[in-house]
Structure formats: structure tokens, C-alpha cells
Amino acid sequence: MKIIFMGTPDFSVPILEALIQAGHEVALAVTQPDKPKGRGKSVQFSPVKTAALAHQIKVYQPKRIREPECVDYLKTFGADIMVVAAFGQILSKEILTMPKYGCVNVHASLLPKYRGASPIQWAVINGDKATGVTTMQMDAGIDTGDILEKTEIPLAEDETGGSLFDKLSESGARLCVQTIAHMQDGMVKRTKQEDAQATHVGMITKQMGKIDWTRPAVQIERLIRGLNPWPSAFTLLDGKMLKIWKAAVLQGADTGQAGQVVCADKHRLIVQTGEGQLSLLEVQLEGKKRMQVDAFLRGFPVVQGQQLS
């Protein structure tokens, strides 16, 4: 098939690569505009742009894909299908109906669950036992189109947002190629979504990582994993930000106030929560590198009874 591919982050790259390897003609890669990065404000390409250029694929970076001149430009390619994977802009009805096979979205959840921008993180934060990838025939709504195919993936006990991101990206690449083949053969059965079962999840923000120690330890531990590697969960220790990268829930009696350090020795840093206790295993103090908690305690003494805020 002749394909216009739309995507921006790392998640999208394996899907683009899989389409190329499957022998499809990717005529155009559409991605978000370049962004300045760092103090020098040097231009940073999106991962999709970098991958597309490596394959000598033409790249298009509109600020607003819905503008008439953008729509007219897409028409010139005569694509059979458009494949969208975490592109970051809403497509107009004219674009959605432009190709013969329409626009297919590769979405990182088992729709209708977790419509929106952050399905991967919320699967971890909510403690789901499984999640997956859905290919969907796009319509004018946000992740509301007909389901084409799905693949399910179990979550490991130590699953993080980052590890699940990688798994779903690779799984989505395989599913996308399979779905397109089935569409060509007329083997795809479209299934309407049950709107009543849908949950919308918005953009992840840095502020979401601020730990509320009055919550149960189980929920805080899942938040830590879900927001790893970005934006990360954090608390304040002596007025400095302390990122928590890894922790373990401890069973036993509650012995202090929420957020209070109930044990601090050479090897352990245990904090009381609203329900249960949390043993911090890997942390990063503001301005310092990420380290195991025993190494952290050697350089930054913490005393029992100290309060995290």
C-alpha cells in the first residue's frame, strides 16, 4: 500500500519501521514541528523525523494539519491509507475520509478503555493486570472510532511506564502490519466501541508526580512505577526535591504519621503512608544522580521521625 504515516515520539518509530520492512511504500512522514532544546536552544528533530530521514522518506511538519493548504498537500500523494501513531494533532473529517482505506490509529490500550493521551501510564498507576494495543478506524472523535483488531499484554509486577511503553510499541508495530494485511484481504471486522466502558485520560503533567503520603502505600508504589521515567514521582526532603524511582510496599502495622520516616539506618529508608509503609529503594536528590538508597543514606543522613512533604 501507499501510506502516509503520522507520528512523533519514540513510540511511533517501530511502527514506521515495521511498515517499511513489510514492503509498503511510505510516501510521506508527517510529524510535529522541530523544537528548541537545552540552553543553547538547538533544534531537536522528533524521533519519527529522524527515522524517516534515515530511510530517505519525505517529511512534513505542519503546525496545524487541519489548515486547507495542509489538506491540499496531503491529497497530492494519493495515499491508499494513513497510519497514525501518537501524532499529537487532531485530523479533520476531510483528511479522515481522504484515503481509500481511511485513517487507522495504533492506540496503546484495549479500547474503549483509556481513550486519550496517557493510556500507558494509567494502566500501571491503576494496577491493571493486562493492557494492550488496538488498531482503530479513526473518526471525528478522540479514540472513538470502530475497533479493527486488538492484542493483549500482561503487566509484570515491576512494570514501569517506560518498560510498558517499549512492549506496547513493538506489539503495536506487529499489529499494525497485520491489520493492514487483513484490510487488504477484506478480513477485518469493524466493532463499535461501548462508550459507557470508556475512560478518558489526559496529558501527564509534572505536578502529578507529587506524592500524597496520605494515600495507601500500594497506590503510591504504582504511581512511582507509572511515572517512571517521566515525569517521575517526587517528595520534598528538607526543602529539596527527592525523586523516587523504585519502592516496595511493606506489610505490617502502621507506626507513624503519613509521610514520616519510621526507619532510617545504613540500608533502609521506610516511610509511613496513609495505609501501610513504603521502603524507598532507589532515589535521586535534587542536583544529584540517581542511586540506590544505601548509597544515598551514606551521603545524606536521614533520621527517624523526619517528615517528608
Image (cartoon, grey):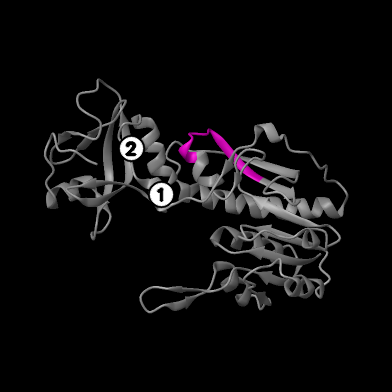
Image location (x, y in percent) of residue 173:
65, 55
Dot 2: few (<14), some (14–19), or many (≥20) neighbours within 10 Å?
some
Image location (x, y in percent) of residue 251:
30, 24
Occupied quadrant, residue 281: top left
Tell me if residue 130 is in the magenta stretch.
yes
Residue identifier under label 2:
212
Is label 1 or label 2 in front? Answer: 2
Image: 121 above or below 173 = above
Tell me if residue 283 is in the magenta stretch.
no
Occupied quadrant, residue 157: top left
Q: Residue at x 47, y 47 (%)?
A: 161
Image: 214 above or below 116 = above
Q: Choose between 255 and 207: the one closer to the eye.
A: 207
Find numbered disc 1 in the image and state the secondary structure of the residue it sits on: loop
Image location (x, y in percent) of residue 78:
84, 71
Q: State left or right for residue 209 relative to residue 192.
A: left
* Any part of residue 229 in sight: no
Q: Residue at x 38, y 43 (%)?
A: 224
Q: Residue at x 61, y 57 (%)?
A: 86
Whole-angstrom CA distance, mark 1 to mark 2, is: 17 Å
* Any part of residue 105 in sight: yes
Residue identifier under label 1:
228
Q: State left or right for residue 243 relative to residue 24.
A: left
Q: What stretch is highlighted in magenta?
A: 124-133
Image location (x, y in percent) of residue 218:
38, 31
Q: State left or right for residue 170 relative to residue 223.
A: right
